[in-house]
Image (cartoon, rainbow, N blue to C red):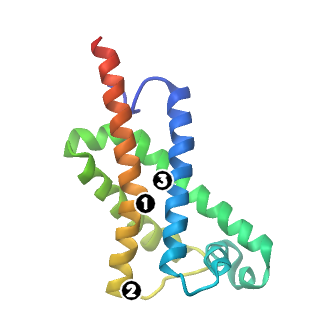
């Protein structure tokens, strides 16, 4: 079996497109819900500030749109990576829920230990409750949807091979 969920690049591409839309939207909604007291624009300005720095908070609607764009680019990057590598993780863990958990942990680690510190946001102090909530959101909104859908597609593909 190849590293992809199936051997049809077009199907994989279409699956990644709609799974990325799902994960990006779920994660965006979770971010808005977690910060329900804040103006929703602030959430996406914060994301845009990773590239534009403090100017993102005074840039108006264009910075909100940049933040939404960056948010989905990041969601698609994780979706693509995890969807394509799902068979590899499955060979090791053999449990789609454990894999979804791992995907969420990896996402949190990459974003908070690598991406955010090297962006214009910089390293933020770690507080245990926000870390637990953040990891939980990423497991539920990114890791599990990708793992559950990739596993379903993997099983369908294997069924077609066995016919």
Q: Choose between 30 and 56: the one closer to the eye.
A: 30
Relative vertical location of residue 106 with respect to residue 51 in this rendering, above or below: above
Mark 2–mark 1 distance (CA, rounded to whole Å): 21 Å
Q: For marks 2 and 1, give the one nearer the viewer.
A: 1
Q: Dot 3 corresponds to which residue? A: 78
Kindly check if marks 3 and 1 are in contact, taking CB atoms under 8 A apart as contact: no
Mark 3–mark 1 distance (CA, rounded to whole Å): 12 Å
Which residue corresponds to the image point at 28% horizontal and 44% vertical from the top-left? Answer: 89
Q: Dot 1 corresponds to which residue? A: 141
x, y percent for residue 34: 47, 78
Q: Choose between 72 and 36: the one closer to the eye.
A: 36
Q: Quadrant of residue 67?
A: bottom right
Which residue corresponds to the image point at 52% horizontal and 52% vertical from the top-left? Answer: 22
Q: Choose between 97 and 50: the one closer to the eye.
A: 97
x, y percent for residue 126: 38, 86
Earlier along the polypeptide chain: callout 2 or callout 3? Answer: 3
| Pointer 1 local density, CA inside 10 Å: few below 14, some 14–19, many at least 20 | many
Q: Dot 2 corresponds to which residue? A: 126
Mark 2–mark 3 distance (CA, rounded to whole Å): 23 Å
Which residue corresponds to the image point at 60% horizontal and 63% vertical from the top-left? Answer: 71
Secondary structure type for disc 3: helix
x, y percent for residue 118: 54, 74
| Pointer 2 local density, CA inside 10 Å: few below 14, some 14–19, many at least 20 | few
Earlier along the polypeptide chain: callout 2 or callout 1? Answer: 2
Earlier along the polypeptide chain: callout 3 or callout 1? Answer: 3
Secondary structure type for disc 2: loop
């Amino acid at each position: 079996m190849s590293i992809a969920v199936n051997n049809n690049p077009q199907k994989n591409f279409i699956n990644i497109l709609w799974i990325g839309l799902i994960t990006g939207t779920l994660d965006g909604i979770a971010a808005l819900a977690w910060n329900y007291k804040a103006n929703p624009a602030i959430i996406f300005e914060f994301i845009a500030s990773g590239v534009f720095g403090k100017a993102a908070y005074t840039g108006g609607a264009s910075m909100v749109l940049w933040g939404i764009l960056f948010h989905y680019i990041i969601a698609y990057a994780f979706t693509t990576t995890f969807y394509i590598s799902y068979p590899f993780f499955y060979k090791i863990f053999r449990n789609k829920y454990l894999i979804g958990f791992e995907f969420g942990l990896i996402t949190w680690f990459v974003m908070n230990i690598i991406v955010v510190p090297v962006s214009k946001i910089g390293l933020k102090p770690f507080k245990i409750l926000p870390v637990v909530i953040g990891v939980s959101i990423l497991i539920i909104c990114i890791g599990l949807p990708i793992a559950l859908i990739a596993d379903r597609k993997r099983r369908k593909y294997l069924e077609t091979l066995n016919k």
